[in-house]
Image (cartoon, rainbow, N blue to C red):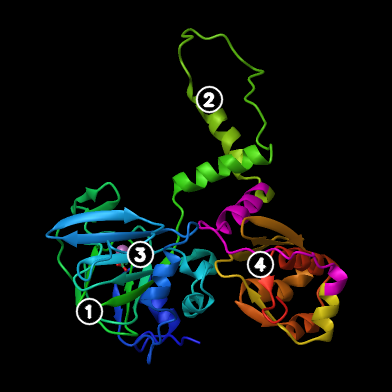
Amino acid sequence: MYQLKINNLSEQEFLSHFWQKKPLLIKQGFSDFQDPLDANELAGLAMEESIESRIVTNHNNEWDTYQGPFEDFEKLTDENATLLVQAVDHWHPEAAQLLEPFRFIPNWRIDDLMISYSTPSGGVGPHLDQYDVFIIQGEGKRHWRVGLPDPTLKQFAQNKKLLQVEAFEAVIDCILEPGDILYIPPGCPHEGYALENALNYSVGFRAPNQQDLLSSFADHIIDTETGQERYTDHNLMLRKSKGELNSTEVNKIKTLMQRLLENDTLFKQWLGTTLSQPKHEMDLAPTEDPFTTEQITNALNNSTIVLERLGGTRAIYQLFEDELLLSVNGENYSLLLSDLNAVKLLTDHGEFESSELSLIKPSLVFLQTFTTLVNEGIWFNTDQG
Ligand code: SIN
Ligand code: CO
């Protein structure tokens, strides 16, 4: 639906020269851009308990942040205000389409679609993000400035909920018009202020740090009751100083921990669950009368239906020597290597036609897994509910 054109660059040229390296202004990345929603619809989402939203205002150089859900929008003043709504792709299928053109980047790196609506002079102020982002201009115009990473730039809290950065020098200073896109790598300071009522769509990415990874790995070994091997010292020798923790002991402890990380099956199982875990709530509607695998198989073989994937679904796979591990929204499913093409229909596409799957002739294990996913409401057919 949305066709992305990155100036005159191929996707590979963009990755080689700009991704994680330099900010880029993409004029008319989407030509004839049509907004998938309007400000009223966005406000409606910001009234929902399960959707994360906030309003940021900057009246007379004073910054204030208000956390949603909102019962009214009196704080969203006619000027100097921005409403921001997280993970709109989880709730709004048309808005979720905006992520599709960016799926040339590995899907586990894609996080969510944040949408903001700003009134003239509204913005969140100068700041840094830890993640890559594509900011798409929808309705209206916004003045953006983007700088290069600078470790001397000081960050400070404008208020408890708003981290900003001091004044920076811009390498991009532009007015975004509908369909224009800004690519901003992690750590590049940026600020954008609306010139007229403006909608902005931020395609955000995730990149775990060591802290996230190790704490999630620790949770996984507790959940799966693994990692029980204990420190031993059968060959303990009497030593002069009883207070020393010597280097042999330090290394033995390090090896004990490394052995756990080197357990390939455990590592990949954990990685599948953690990287496919959505960070925001999902709009899940499990089937009331669960389908049997036979019913799903018959439906796939005997009718042409479109199977859609629920917005915000994170589906990835890893290839092992003797099996394929599919991970969907934090759950792992062991499948046969011969089901690779069937799995790709689930992981590489937002939707597919039933005939594409039945032609592949998936295994019974795959069909059982797919039945579970349909019953959970993760894949569905809108015609049949
Ligand atoms: C915004 O849309 O106001 C914020 C987007 C960003 O700076 O990441
Ligand atoms: Co930002």
In x, y percent, where is residue 159? 24, 49
Q: Is residue 263 above or below residue 139?
A: above
Comparing labels 1 and 2, the label whose residue is closer to the camera? 1
Q: Amino acid at mark 2?
A: Thr
Residue identifier under label 3: 84
Q: Is residue 251 above or below residue 199?
A: above
Q: Residue 226: name its quadrant.
A: top right
Comparing labels 2 and 3, the label whose residue is closer to the camera? 3
Q: Is mark 3 within 8 Å of ligand 1?
A: yes
User: Which disc is residue 378 wearing?
Assistant: 4
Q: Amino acid at mark 3?
A: Leu
Question: Is residue 283 inside the magenta stretch?
Answer: yes
In x, y percent, where is residue 70? 38, 59
Sequence-wise, which precedes: disc 3 or disc 4? 3
Q: Residues within 10 Å of mark 1 (few under 14, many from 20)?
A: some
**Along the line of sight, which residue is nearer the eye, 215 or 64?**
64
In x, y percent, where is residue 160? 28, 46
Q: Secondary structure at mark 1?
A: loop
Q: Secondary structure at mark 4?
A: loop
Residue identifier under label 1: 196
Residue identifier under label 2: 248
Q: Secondary structure at mark 3?
A: strand
Rounded to the nearest angstrom, the CA distance separating label 3 from label 4 is 26 Å
Look at the image and give the residue range highlighted in magenta.
266-295
Sequence-wise, which precedes: disc 1 or disc 3? 3
Q: Is residue 336 above or below residue 228?
A: below
Sequence-wise, which precedes: disc 4 or disc 1? 1
Assign ligand 1 to one image quadrant: bottom left
Rounded to the nearest angstrom, the CA distance separating label 4 from label 1 is 38 Å
